[in-house]
Image: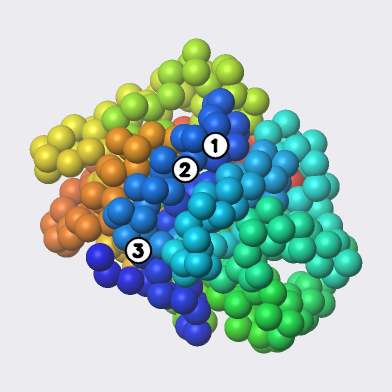
Amino acid sequence: MEKRKLGKYGAEVSPIGVGAMSFSNFYGATNEKESHRILTEALDQDISHIDTANVYGAGASEAAIGSFLAKQGPQRNTLFSIATKVGIKGNIQTGKTEFDNSSDYLKKELDSSLKRLGVDSVDLYYIHRRDQNIPIEEVTETLAGFVKAGKIRSFGFSEIAPSSLRRAAAIHHVAAVQSEYSLSVRSPELGLVQATAELGTALVAFSPLGRSLLTDRPHSSDKVEKMDWLSKNPRFKEPNLTFNTEAASRFRDLAAQYGVSAAALAIAWLLNKHEHIIPIPGTRSVKHFLEHCNGASLRLSPEQMSQIEIVLPLGWAQGDRYSEKQWIGPEKYS
């Protein structure tokens, strides 16, 4: 499996990672045993990057990764390139959050994350959401200090605008920017894809499967109603959910024509767009995880890429990607 770099000077990792939000109960009930099954399969499939955060399950995701690593013996520190995030305080499922990028808070939370993970350092440490009360230059200096101290090897930012990335990069190289990016969310193409490529920064794409819309098993209304966060998301409220599910059926049909799952094709589309993009799909199912891995090995011709964008053209999805409350934190740009 080909490798991609976490930034200009960062670690070489598998072309996709494991999105470990699914190791918490964000999209439905899970447990440590299920998380460990995914991590075991990741090792078997040579998937080397894991993405988590301190707020995923109030530390539960990090703890599940840490308990898995604890069973691996001396090689525990070399098996995965781990990224975690900081900056959100509160409950991301309910949207009752605030943001803190102060140096004291970042340091305290980093130490707690390292303890839960059971490692001395992580490859990548993200600011999960920007605290607009603190200049990004000041936050970058704090993160650079963690690199010098050996607690992190590199750092990044999640959901920031290209202009913010350039401000931070003027202080220190930014290894990665994390953003929602998929066939249903194309906004990074309004400058973030270009800025990250120019600066040698990896673009780590979360929710590359459109929160299920780009799979063969899109969430039903009944299932969405049981999810705190998704039930408030405009794309998953009726009549938008029915419209989007039916619109994406053309993509599912195309994937079937190619002899692959819709999830594999959605991931392959992202990987074939730009070589600095690293999707991090999440799942609690080994079967679905293997579909993700299949997508990492697909090579698409220019004709196939065009076909995909014909069946799902720019702007096809109905409804905003976030509700008004969910938009608090992510930076908008155009």
3 or 2: tag closer to the N-terminus: 3
- Label 1 belongs to which residue? 32
Answer with left or right where residue 108 lies relative to residue 181: right
The answer to whether the residue labelled 3 contacts the one labelled 2, judged by CB atoms less than 8 Å apart, is no
Q: Amino acid at mark 3?
A: Pro
Res 189 → quadrant: bottom left
- Label 3 belongs to which residue? 15
3 or 1: tag closer to the N-terminus: 3
Provide residue 15's location: percent of width, then percent of height.
35, 63
Q: Amino acid at mark 2?
A: His
Q: Amino acid at mark 1?
A: Glu
* Front-lying residue, 137 or 227: 227
Look at 24% across and 49% down and name the residue there.
Answer: 294
The answer to whether the residue labelled 1 contacts the one labelled 2, judged by CB atoms less than 8 Å apart, is yes
- Label 2 belongs to which residue? 36
Identify whether 107 is placed above or below 292: below
Question: Can residue 116 be seen?
Answer: yes
Q: Pointer 2: residues within 10 angstroms few (<14), some, or many (20+)?
A: some
